[in-house]
Amino acid sequence: MKKTLIALAALGAMAGAAHAQSTVTLYGLLDANFGGFKTNSASASTPTPTIQNLTQTKIESGGLNGSRWGMRMSEDLGGGMAAIGNLESGINLDTGVNTQTGVLFGRRANVGLSSGFGTVTLGRNSSSYDDVSADHAMMGQSIFDPSNVNNGITSDAAQTAVTAVSAAAPVNATNATAIANLLNRGGRTWLGYATRFDNSVKYISPNFSGFSGSAMYAFGENKTTTQDATKSISANLKYANGPLLVSGGYQAEGTRTTLANDAKVENTLLSVAYDFGVAKVGAGFNRAKFKDVFKADGTQLAAQNEWNLSVAVPLGATTLSAGYAQSKGDDLGKSTGFGVQALYALSKRTTLYAGGLSSKAYDNLADKTAAKYVGSDIGRATTYAVGMRHTF
């Protein structure tokens, strides 16, 4: 009897130790705002085009960050190794629906191993490019940040649109139209990119004296007898030491080989940020390049060169920020934007915010033509909003 009690006690201790070595963390972020959103575009009026104004007063989700909830899992396997997993779902607080329509864990769904060699995950991952995309943005890629590329087009829709372009005939007017629609600025200045990828493997290195890196490869898994699979690659390299941060990112997405072409969108980014204490400044330089994306005349769609400057000034519980961004190319035109924002920390987990953004772009030939007649307000978008973010 005594041996039985000892054995049961030992089993209980082992079970308790095993339980202590496994953790599941529930987390989330809730962000909603109230504001006014105005856009100007060219009408089809003849012989003289006019400006059509659209102003909406709305409650929207995700002013500073996208609303989400998720779970992180970790089990200590011993020897410094752990089994990890992450499930994350996006939420539109204004409607309650899922951000990635029809996908429960559209923001992240992966499992992997973590050890001294780094971290490897399989599943739906954020891209390595996206992981460093905000390093230069002192406004944190909020809705007031002119370099924000979160233009309302989900990564799934982006991949679908690029794939559609890739599958089209090379010399086709819809090629340029489709890619322009995919990368429409949506009130922002820089062009868009896919932030997450299905069927991907991702590696994140350890930190070596401030240096770290990451790489991701996404298998399209849609190969047929006449075309290769849609596949994408992404990578980054970062140096963060004290007040200095320097990072670079690369992403090639939407590749789909056919007998005709192999279209893709490539983004190459360099970011620099420095914290002076009284203020933090950042600068970003990006090149959005198109491969085998053709205009109606058969020539290649020209690349966009993009840059952004921003600053953040902490004043106790308040942080004031401002930024200016530009994107310019021979075919998709020039876009500029200026934004300001103010954050007030009610607590460590709750932040109030307010800001404004004004951007201008010629989105198509009609807008460029109309601008000659009706002035420079064509293609302008303006946003003013106040909101609250809460993390848990």
Image (spheres, rainbow, N blue to C red):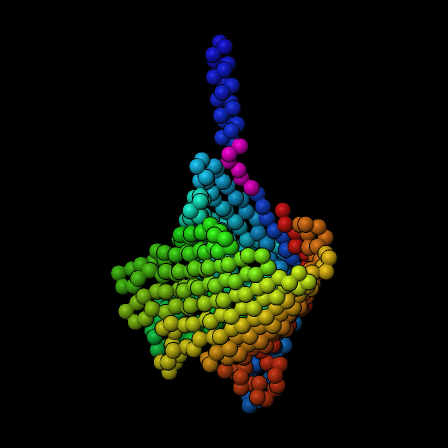
- Asked if the stretch drawn in magenta spans residue 250, the answer is no
Q: Nearer the viewer, residue 188 or 316?
A: 316
In this figure, what is the number of numbered marks?
0
Taking the spot 47% from the left edge, 17% from the top edge, the residue there is: 7
Image x and y of residue 104, in percent? 50, 50
Q: Nearer the viewer, residue 352 or 183?
A: 352
Name of the residue lying farthest toward the top: 1
Q: Nearer the viewer, residue 134 or 117?
A: 117
Say if residue 276 shows up in the picture.
yes
Say left or right for 245 vs 221: right
Name of the residue lying farthest toward the bottom: 47
Residue 61 figure quarter = bottom right
Image x and y of residue 355, in percent? 68, 66
Taking the spot 48% from the left edge, 56% from the top edge, the residue there is: 211
Segment colored magenta = 20-25
Say if residue 154 shows up in the picture.
no
Taking the spot 54% from the left edge, 72% from the top edge, the residue there is: 307
Taking the spot 43% from the left edge, 63% from the top edge, the residue there is: 251
Above or below residue 172? Residue 124 is above
- For the stretch drawn in magenta, the main secondary structure is strand
Q: Nearer the viewer, residue 383 or 5?
A: 5
Say left or right for 297 vs 63: left
Image x and y of residue 375, in percent? 61, 86
Say left or right for 266 vs 22: left
Say left or right for 41 vs 259: right
Image x and y of residue 151, in percent? 54, 66
